[in-house]
Amino acid sequence: ENRVWSAERELFPQLVAEGARLFATGTDAYWMDIGTPEKYVRANMDALSGTFPTDAAGSVGPDGVLAAEPSDIAEDARVSSACLGSGARVASGATVSGSVLLPSVSVAEGATVVNCALGEGTIVSAGARIANGAVGDGEIIE
């Protein structure tokens, strides 16, 4: 059956109703349910800003950019607070801010990407603008 399912709304109440014992523990560790594109981007931005310790912290550049190798950011592109997957490309005059670009995403000349999660192989065409959203793998934004 293909449907939305929630452990905290379905499984846990059922277990309690059946008399099962449930346990919990507190922690000061960072945790976020990243089940929406907005929260997925937020968690990545929190990692970039040092909200919680991460192995990638030493690789974050001065503008809050974490770019996997190989990736290509044009010299005059404006990229800040962003995670770029392997093979990502940001062309001349493009802007990427507050976003997560999965591997092989291409942002063409003069395009703008703000507060987005872009799936693997997505192409943002020259001059296109996308903000506050998520795009699946292999899509073309015009």
Image: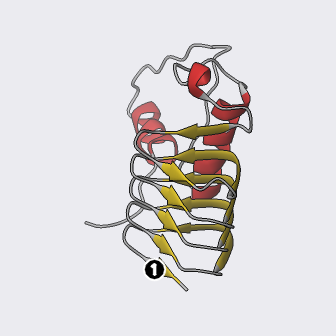
Please state if 76 lies on the left or on the right of 22 as rendered: right
Q: At which x and y percent is residue 49?
A: 73, 31
Q: In which quarter of the image is residue 32?
A: top right
The image position of residue 8, as x and y in percent, is 51, 41
Residue 123 vertical placement versus 127 (above, below): above
Count of marks overlaid on the render:
1
Picture quarter containing residue 46?
top right
At a point 61% along the width and 40% down the height, the residue shown is 44
Q: Which of 45 and 113 is in front in this view?
A: 113
Q: Which quadrant, please, contains the N terminus?
A: bottom left
Give, as a three-letter code, the residue at label 1.
Ile
Q: How is the image coloured?
A: secondary structure
In the image, what residue occupies the spot 46% across and 39% down? 68
As drawn, which residue projects farthest toward the bottom? 142
Quarter placement of the C terminus: bottom right
SS for tag 1?
strand
Seen at 38% across and 67% down, the residue is: 137
Say above or below: 2 vs 115.
Answer: below
Name the residue that disc number 1 marks: 140
Q: Residue furthest front?
A: 75
**Residue at the image point whose x is 63% and y is 13% from the top:** 27
Q: Where is residue 40 in the image (x, y as percent from the top left)?
A: 58, 48
Mark 1 Cα shell of 10 Å, populated few (<14), some (14-19), many (≥20): few
Q: Where is residue 61 in the image (x, y as percent from the top left)?
A: 66, 32
